[in-house]
Image (cartoon, helix red, strand yellow):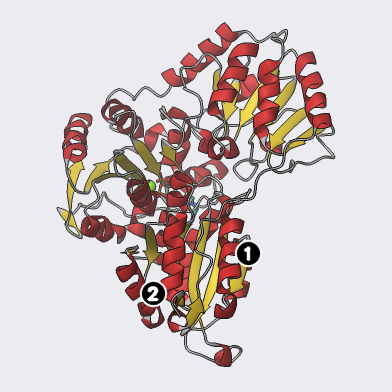
Amino acid sequence: MDRNMTFAEYLVALLKKQGVKHLFGIPSGDWLAYMEAMESGGLDFTLVANEASGGFMATVYGWLTGVPGVCYGTTGPGATNLSTGVGSAYLDRAPLLALTTEPPDKMMGRITQMAIDHQTLFKPLTKKTMRLDPSHAQEMLSDAIKTALSEVPGPVHIGLPEGTGDVVVDARLLEKFEADPIEECSDDAMIAMEKRFSASKKPLLAIGLTAVRLGLGPQIVRIAEKHKIPVVLTPMAKGLIDEDHRSYAGVLFHALSDIVALTNKEADLVVAIGYDPVEFNYEAWMPVVPLVHIDTTSCDIDRAVYTDILDVVGNPESALQRLIDLDPIDSKWNMDALKERRDLMFAKFEPTEGVFGPLTILKVLRKLLPDDGILTCDVGAHTHLIGQAWRTRHPYGQLMTNGWSSMGFGIPAALGAKLARPEAPVVCITGDGGYMMMVGEMATAKRIGLPIVFIVLSDTKLELIRLKQKKRGKVTEGTTLSDVQPQAAEFVFGVPVLSVDSAEAYEEALKKALASDGPVIVHAYIDQSEYEPLILRKHK
Ligand SMILES: Cc1ncc(C[n+]2csc(CCOP(=O)(O)OP(=O)(O)O)c2C)c(N)n1
Ligand SMILES: [Mg+2]
């Protein structure tokens, strides 16, 4: 019996072996065995206010550490709450294990309080879903962890039948599991890639979130520099190349995308590196020119319209090295004109005289947040602005959910980031709508004592949707959160609130908040008029 332990103890030991330090969720009666095992085994159980946040925290934790994020929800409503966060791991590509309690075998298929079919619930939200059989615990868990980590990473759901935590299991396999290796790209594909690239006069590099995950930034910058060609990024690839770099041409999809489109239009070839269309389909922005798609999976595109597609599938490293090794191409890009275009774009992000709006929020924050800082944001009009206007100093320096795009992401993302990178200053910008969804996590931040600055953009509106209403010119109801600016409380679940309505007060509050050793909310009463001329522009 010396290698036997309860399943709960085994699970904790195995997760610790993978490097997991936190497990996010809300407990239930059946989870108590696991909590005891976590306490005695030295794994932190982070209680959250809503299981959805637990999923978001685990997603961000997975991105930043490369270790699977782990979250838990109980039967039925715990699992459905959790599913919102699990969706982020799925469409924002994070390794994650989602644990839920399921009824015991003899109650499966019977009418039971709280119980629904979790396997069906999680099927469209995960790479794999399984109901744990404790007699096969080792194989099942190793399969779950490897699946979550391997390309394309994502969530795996493990349903834990009630009572499983106390079952004694044979616990031999206590090793660290790795992702499956990524295959090399085929030589034929790489030769074809070299030919197209060398023949092109105006290739455009389009970079997506896979490139961040695989750490391809340095090679991409070398290719751009050597061949003197521009680079566009998806929002989640921000930070891969400096916004002041000679080759930087902007972010697709977000504010002033019409200016970025001027560059896209000139391209005679698009070389997409780690471009995951989950953020923005190719068709939405790409001119009809040949495409070389270098990624771990093949290209998803309308092949009836885009007929000249070269898939270079596998580990992008060697393909990128080949592009670096080529002789410089005969680039016809006018890099000075690109710089002018870039300068013109950033000039439009200067705050409007006499207006305390989102542009001031970003400008002052960029001045005060150190370069190693991490900014998380939520989903809304502010996201579209941040996507283009924010200068990101390093990969994962700006965290957003542009694949799943769920409101409520920003606040838990900041908690997940701070737990994963305790040494980095972390700031969250959220709209007031997203804040309402996740305000309960202020209690979590306070309890753990996480020094995070939460900037709430109080514009009393679901502004992104209101602007879409305005464009269509019909319905105007249903996007007003409050008829007047609501008066902020002094504390929210013990977290101090600094309310501000001017640039000067904001700067002072932000300095104070960044110096605090605990969480602080900066509640900014903003004028949202700056968004309209900048966001929801044409992409082509
Ligand atoms: C869970 C969820 N519900 C609804 C939406 C649709 N949606 C996208 S942005 C948005 C408005 C967000 O408002 P707010 O948080 O105040 O941010 P703002 O647009 O004002 O900056 C809505 C409703 C969504 N993306 N996610
Ligand atoms: Mg709002």
Please tell me which of labels 1 and 2 falls first in the chain. 2
Residue, x 44% and y 34% (percent of image)? 385
At mark 1, the secondary structure is strand
Residue 56 image point, x, y percent: 44, 55
Q: Nearer the viewer, residue 476 or 282?
A: 282
Specify the amino acid type for callout 2: Tyr
Residue, x 51% and y 59% (percent of image)? 175
On residue 217, which mark appears? none
Where is residue 140, by image quadrant?
bottom right
Where is residue 183, by image quadrant?
top right
Residue 244 in view here: yes
**Quarter of the C terminus within the rendering:** top right
Q: Is residue 456 above or below residue 46?
A: above
**Other-residue count near label 2 (Cα within 10 Å), few / some / many at <14 / 14–19 / ≥20:** many
Where is residue 427, by image quadrant?
top left
Residue 204 image point, x, y percent: 67, 22
On residue 128, which mark appears? 1
* Distance Cα–Cα, label 1 vs label 2: 22 Å
At mark 2, the secondary structure is helix
Residue, x 85% and y 40% (percent of image)? 304
Residue 456 image point, x, y percent: 30, 46
Mark 2: C-beta under 8 Å from nearest atom of ligand 1: no
**Other-residue count near label 1 (Cα within 10 Å), few / some / many at <14 / 14–19 / ≥20:** some
User: Which dot, 1 or 2, sits closer to the camera?
Assistant: 2
On residue 34, which mark appears? 2
Q: Is residue 540 above or below residue 227?
A: below
Residue 466 in view here: no
Residue 465 image point, x, y percent: 49, 48
Mark 1: C-beta under 8 Å from nearest atom of ligand 1: no
Specify the amino acid type for callout 1: Lys
